[in-house]
């Protein structure tokens, strides 16, 4: 299974394809930019390979999203995506989108129906992914009663005894 997402940032269009393990966990990504042969297209394809190898060798998606969201460089601009709005860079957009889809639980209605159809023996998943969908979700963000960010209005996530905005990086008063 996989998901393909079209994106556009300040006129730079591309497609993010996320290959999924049978339990819905991302295992590889492919990034194709619309301008074939451009430097950005080549760099993004190589970067997709690096992220894929990282995911396949056990680096949690949460770690990648935390490190690469909110990176700022050109091209940046409005995305046309109501959920994400302004992207500070292509990396910012891609990893905030993946965080939204795979760590917030918003992907569940899309995948739950397909998950019942795709059944694999436990031995096929043992080397690559957690044994069950619920086990994967247990490791993800749990928002609970988190407040809204006063800067951008997004739902914050727990960060120690305080809360941090996954969208803009703001905190609930802690440093």
Image (cartoon, rainbow, N blue to C red):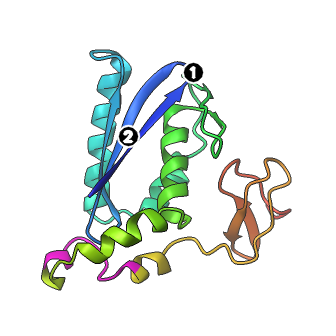
In the rendered image, the vertical position of residue 119 relative to residue 153, given as above or below: below
Residue at 57% x, 27% y is 73
Specify the quadrant of the image occupied by residue 61.
bottom left
The quadrant the C terminus occupies is bottom right
Determine whether, in the image, residue 168 is placed left or right of residue 66.
Answer: right
In the rendered image, the vertical position of residue 17 relative to residue 15, given as above or below: below
Upstream in the sequence, badge 2 or badge 1?
Answer: 1
| Image x and y of residue 168, in percent | 70, 47
Residue 126 on the magenta span: yes
Q: What kind of element bears circle 2?
A: strand
Q: What kind of element bears circle 1?
A: loop
Determine whether, in the image, residue 165 is placed left or right of residue 24.
Answer: right
Residue at 28% x, 73% y is 129
Point out the stretch of residues depicted in magenta: 124-133
Query: Dot 2: few (<14), some (14–19), or many (≥20) neighbours within 10 Å?
Result: some
Residue 26 on the magenta span: no
The quadrant the N terminus occupies is bottom left
Which residue lies under the disc numbered 1? 10
Determine whether, in the image, residue 155 is placed left or right of residue 67.
Answer: right
Which residue lies under the disc numbered 2? 16
Specify the quadrant of the image occupied by residue 36.
top left
Mark number displayed over residue 148: none
């Amino acid at each position: 299974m996989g998901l393909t997402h079209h994106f556009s940032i300040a006129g730079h269009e591309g497609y993010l394809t996320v290959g999924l393990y049978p339990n819905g966990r991302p295992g590889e990504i492919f990034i194709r930019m619309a301008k074939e042969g451009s430097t950005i297209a080549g760099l993004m394809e190589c970067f997709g390979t690096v992220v894929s190898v990282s995911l396949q060798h056990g680096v949690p998606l949460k770690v990648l999203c935390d490190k690469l969201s909110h990176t700022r460089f050109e091209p940046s601009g409005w995305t046309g995506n109501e959920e994400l709005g302004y992207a500070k860079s292509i990396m910012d957009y891609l990893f905030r989108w993946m965080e939204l889809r795979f760590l917030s639980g918003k992907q569940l209605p899309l995948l739950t129906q397909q998950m019942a159809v795709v059944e694999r023996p436990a031995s096929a998943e043992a080397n690559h992914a957690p044994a069950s969908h619920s086990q994967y979700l247990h490791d993800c963000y749990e928002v609970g009663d988190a407040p809204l960010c006063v800067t951008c209005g997004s739902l914050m996530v727990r960060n120690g005894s305080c809360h941090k905005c996954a969208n803009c990086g703001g905190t609930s008063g802690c440093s």
